[in-house]
Image (spheres, grey):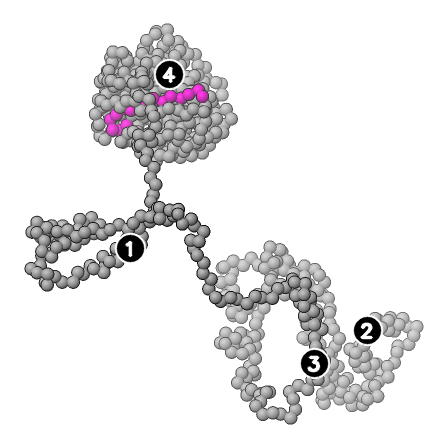
């Protein structure tokens, strides 16, 4: 059972119907003990008395009734007590646990994140009731419980309380904007305390304070302080304002003999143009406008008209009406005078030629390719890609006609034609001079082809190297499949196939010739893959995609890897496996990329006809943007030994530039366009698709949409 916390018993009003015949001693004692208890001074005395009574050593104290009470009053009280004892337990709720919340008048949101909602009278936590009713339970309760509409939750205890009829009526009265108390009359007659008639008795007869007729000591102290401050000069009295206006000579301190700056820089107002023949009231007939001229004059913008009026002819001066634009013209003249800058601007006379940087003449920057020497014909469709052997003796070209052709550079003779059964997107000759191997991108495969050209020992050693591969005991999971060519493919020169899951668009070799990278037309993290030929092992270097990759490059000296997306070029360190730099191309869509043999400068071509030169030591933004081409750039290339770079565009031209990079780090690179090479015919709005330099000579090869490869020397 819960703790009892019942206060002193309530004193009952005596009533007439409860009269008793006699009062025994014990009953009388209980009656008076109840009354005494309610008026007792301290509870400690009661406890001591109880202890003594229970001991048995001393007799129970007999209390004399008060003399003022009559026997009738006593019998009435006795009956009252009996009734109270009878009804006491009907209304008493103290047997239940008294869960009064003792946290006080605070926001209950403070207990939102706690399992309890407050503390009871003992200081123990009152835990929140477990409420896991969902919307379905709420709906069922709403349907089944007839008192749902009058049940609210007590925020202090978290218990549900059913409102009584009186409380509901109170809420409804307040909602209707009425007073909460039913018996309150808002329209009672006002009691006029302060009337216009002088009453005999005052409203309050409180005697006046002493302070109301004695000078204030605090004010006296304040005044004495202010007097002291004025005497010491800390507070100065206000001076009376002088209302007389002050005039002074503006030019009193100026030298009367000197020419003032204002007058020296004075610009007189421009005079109005004198009227001509067209403004006459009877102009010559050639000044009058015809119907067509009048119509054209009306359709012109006001700012574009030669005359701001239409010339008209009148027979005499008396017939001339008032000029309708007179006020408008006067107002514009006033604006001209008021807005005219009255100051002479000192203009610096600069020769425009001095602003153009002094560039060396192209003939001082030779050698560079100037004339078309050879045309390599044979392809029937557009030639997409070119590559040249490290010795510079052989050239390979890939075309949309599904063939790869090998040419002798000096004679333009086609040495070998390899049908591959698909559009060739990219070819790359292995840069290692001791290996004779060409990587070709066709559909979803990279073909490693031995063209068997030139030195027999060289291409024999390449075949021997590929055949000496031993497969590892445990097969590793790879993103691609390495497939050895069958007999028929082997006879064509194909040695290995690296099969990818998606179509390829580029392949490039590392400078040592063992690793190659391929780019897949896909937007996932599998866009770029790096393959090792000697171990026939492929890996995906990137965990997540950073955008649509356009092309990739290996650094010629350091372990860096360049990845060009549509707008950025990211430089990764392959040893540390981290991003080193992110270059901003300032272009809409990067199409191609080439790196200087020194490794500190790269160029990027873009489809919005810009070529961006980056100095990697200088900045992540372009050192220079060249806009020489009129259409999209398809390819860019550096020469391995000469300070030359070239760009091929859809306008059908190849522009060769001199790009000198100095060893002195304080000196910026010198970029000079030296030659525009023409020759390719535009086909299907495409021009030059690929450019490549000869490894040793200052020659440049270009392949075009017209199905030809051209050599400029």
Pointer 2 residue? 42
- Spatial separation of the CA atoms under disc 1 and disc 4: 68 Å
Image x and y of residue 232, in percent: 68, 63
- Quadrant position of the C terminus in the picture: top left
Say which of 253 and 297 sits in front: 253
The tag earlier along the polypeptide, 2 or 3, is: 2
- Spatial separation of the CA atoms under disc 4 and disc 2: 114 Å
Pointer 4 residue? 641
Say which of 615 and 38 sits in front: 615
- Spatial separation of the CA atoms under disc 2 and disc 3: 50 Å
- Spatial separation of the CA atoms under disc 3 and disc 1: 75 Å
Image x and y of residue 124, in percent: 70, 60
**Residue drawn 33% across the image and 39% down it:** 347
Give the number of the disc on residue 588. Answer: none
Pointer 3 residue? 213
Instruction: Tell me if I can see residue 318 in this picture.
Output: yes
């Amino acid at each position: 059972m819960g703790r009892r916390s019942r206060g002193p018993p309530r004193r009952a009003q005596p009533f007439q119907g409860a009269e008793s015949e006699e009062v025994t001693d014990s009953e009388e004692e209980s009656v008076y003990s109840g009354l005494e208890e309610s008026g007792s001074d301290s509870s400690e005395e009661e406890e001591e008395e109880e202890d003594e009574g229970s001991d048995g050593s001393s007799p129970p104290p007999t209390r004399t009734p008060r003399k003022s009470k009559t026997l009738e009053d006593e019998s009435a009280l006795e009956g009252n007590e009996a009734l109270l004892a009878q009804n006491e337990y009907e209304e008493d709720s103290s047997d239940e646990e008294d869960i009064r919340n003792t946290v006080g008048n605070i926001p209950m949101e403070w207990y939102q994140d706690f399992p309890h909602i407050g503390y009871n009278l003992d200081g123990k936590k009152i835990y929140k009731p477990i409420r896991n009713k969902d919307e379905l339970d709420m709906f069922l309760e709403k349907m089944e419980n007839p008192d749902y509409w009058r049940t609210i939750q007590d925020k202090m205890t978290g218990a549900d309380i059913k409102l009584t009829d009186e409380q509901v009526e109170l809420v409804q009265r307040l909602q209707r904007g009425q007073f909460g108390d039913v018996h309150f009359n808002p329209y009672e007659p006002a009691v006029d305390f302060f009337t216009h008639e002088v009453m005999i008795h005052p409203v309050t007869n409180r005697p006046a304070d002493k302070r109301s007729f004695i000078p204030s000591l605090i004010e006296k102290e304040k005044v004495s302080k202010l007097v002291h401050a004025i005497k010491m000069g800390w507070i100065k009295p206000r001076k009376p304002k002088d209302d007389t206006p002050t005039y002074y000579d503006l030019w009193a301190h100026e030298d009367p003999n000197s020419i003032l700056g204002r007058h020296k820089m004075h610009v007189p107002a421009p005079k109005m143009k004198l009227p001509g023949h067209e403004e006459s009231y009877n102009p010559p007939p050639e000044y009058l406008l015809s119907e067509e001229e009048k119509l054209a004059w009306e359709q012109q913008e006001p700012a574009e008209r030669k005359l701001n009026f239409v010339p008209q002819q009148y027979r005499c001066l008396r017939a001339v009406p008032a000029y309708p634009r007179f006020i408008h013209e006067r107002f514009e003249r006033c604006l001209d005078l008021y807005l005219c800058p009255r100051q002479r601007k000192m203009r610096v006379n600069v020769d425009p030629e001095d602003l153009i940087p002094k560039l060396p003449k192209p003939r001082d920057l030779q050698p560079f390719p100037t004339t078309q020497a050879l045309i390599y014909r044979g392809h029937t469709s557009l030639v997409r890609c070119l590559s040249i052997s490290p010795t510079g003796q052989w050239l390979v070209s890939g075309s949309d006609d599904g063939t790869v052709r090998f040419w002798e550079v000096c004679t333009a003779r086609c040495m070998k034609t390899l049908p591959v059964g698909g559009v060739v997107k990219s070819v790359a000759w292995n840069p290692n001079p001791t290996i004779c191997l060409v990587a070709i991108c066709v559909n979803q495969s990279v073909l490693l082809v031995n063209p068997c050209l030139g030195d027999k020992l060289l291409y024999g050693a390449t075949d021997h190297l590929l055949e000496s591969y031993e497969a590892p005991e445990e097969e590793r999971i790879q993103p691609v499949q390495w497939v050895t060519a069958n007999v028929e493919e082997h006879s064509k020169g194909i040695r290995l196939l690296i099969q990818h899951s998606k179509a390829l668009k580029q392949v490039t070799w590392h400078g040592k010739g063992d690793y190659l990278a391929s780019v897949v037309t896909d937007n996932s993290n599998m866009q770029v893959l790096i393959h090792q030929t000697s171990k026939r092992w492929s890996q995906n270097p990137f965990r997540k995609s950073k955008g649509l990759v356009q092309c990739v490059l290996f650094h010629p000296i350091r372990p860096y890897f360049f990845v060009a997306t549509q707008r950025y070029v990211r430089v990764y360190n392959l040893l540390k496996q981290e991003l080193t730099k992110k270059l901003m191309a300032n272009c809409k869509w990067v199409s191609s990329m080439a790196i200087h043999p020194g490794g500190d400068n790269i160029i990027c071509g873009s489809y919005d006809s810009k070529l961006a030169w980056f100095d990697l030591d200088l900045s992540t933004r372009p050192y220079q943007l060249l806009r020489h081409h009129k259409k999209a750039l398809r390819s860019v290339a550096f020469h391995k030994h000469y300070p030359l770079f070239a760009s091929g565009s859809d306008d059908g031209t190849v522009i060769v530039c001199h790009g000198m990079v100095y060893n002195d780090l304080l000196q910026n690179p010198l970029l000079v366009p030296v030659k525009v090479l023409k020759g390719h015919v535009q086909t299907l709005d495409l021009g030059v698709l690929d450019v490549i330099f000869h490894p040793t000579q200052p020659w440049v090869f270009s392949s075009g949409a017209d199905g030809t490869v051209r050599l400029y020397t």
